[in-house]
Image (cartoon, rainbow, N blue to C red):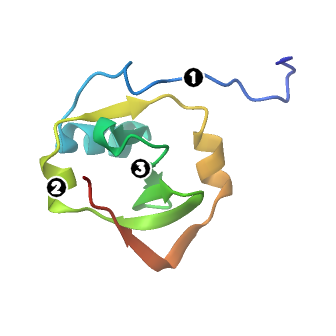
Amino acid sequence: MVHSPTSPTVKVVTRESWRPLDFFQAVKRALDKGERIARKSWDNDDYCAMIDGWLAIHREGKTHRWLVSETDMQGKDWFILPDPVEQTLEQTPVNQEEDQQTTTP
């Protein structure tokens, strides 16, 4: 990949390179620092972030307001993702008509 001033920097993060947080630590980071969060147990490309003042989840290429499940709140496998995909979130409008509740396996 050739980097130019207009091309975004892409970092690869695997679910193995994470530092575990509980839900409240992860959400605090999303609120305070605007960082994206995810769970290792999701084992996919889903992630959460603050978008337009809402806690939102990015699933299957779409961003939705997120209704957090009890299982996710009790999870201790949350981690912080690096910034590059944040640009994708900003370009994807939050679908306010389809609130999304996730359940974990």
Kind of element beneath mark 1: loop
Q: Residue at x 64, y 47 (%)?
A: 88
Closer mark to the observer between disc 3 and disc 2: 2
Q: Are dots 3 and 1 in contact, CB under 8 Å?
A: no
Give the distance between the C-alpha atoms of the residues marked 1 and 2, in whole angstroms.
27 Å
Q: How many marks?
A: 3
Q: Residue at x 16, y 55 (%)?
A: 71
SS at mark 2 in the image: helix
Element carrying mark 3: strand
Depth check: 24 or 59 in front?
A: 59
Q: Residue 6, percent across and down?
A: 85, 29
- Residue at x-position 54% and y-position 58%: 60
Dot 3, crowdedness within 10 Å: few (<14), some or many (≥20)? Answer: many
Give the CA distance from mark 3 to mark 2. 15 Å
Q: Which mark is residue 71?
A: 2
Q: Is residue 95 above or below residue 88?
A: below
Q: Quadrant of residue 43?
A: top left
At label 1, the amino acid type is Val
Type of amino acid under label 2: Thr
How far apart are the two marked residues, 3 and 1, measured between alpha carbons?
17 Å
Q: Measured from the top left, where is residue 49 in percent x and y?
A: 43, 49
Q: How many residues crowd around disc 1 within 10 Å: few (fewer than 14), some, or many (20 or more)?
A: few
| Labels 1 and 2 touching (C-beta < 8 A) | no
- Left or right of 79, for residue 5: right
The disc labelled 3 sits on which kind of residue?
Cys
Residue beneath disc 1? 12
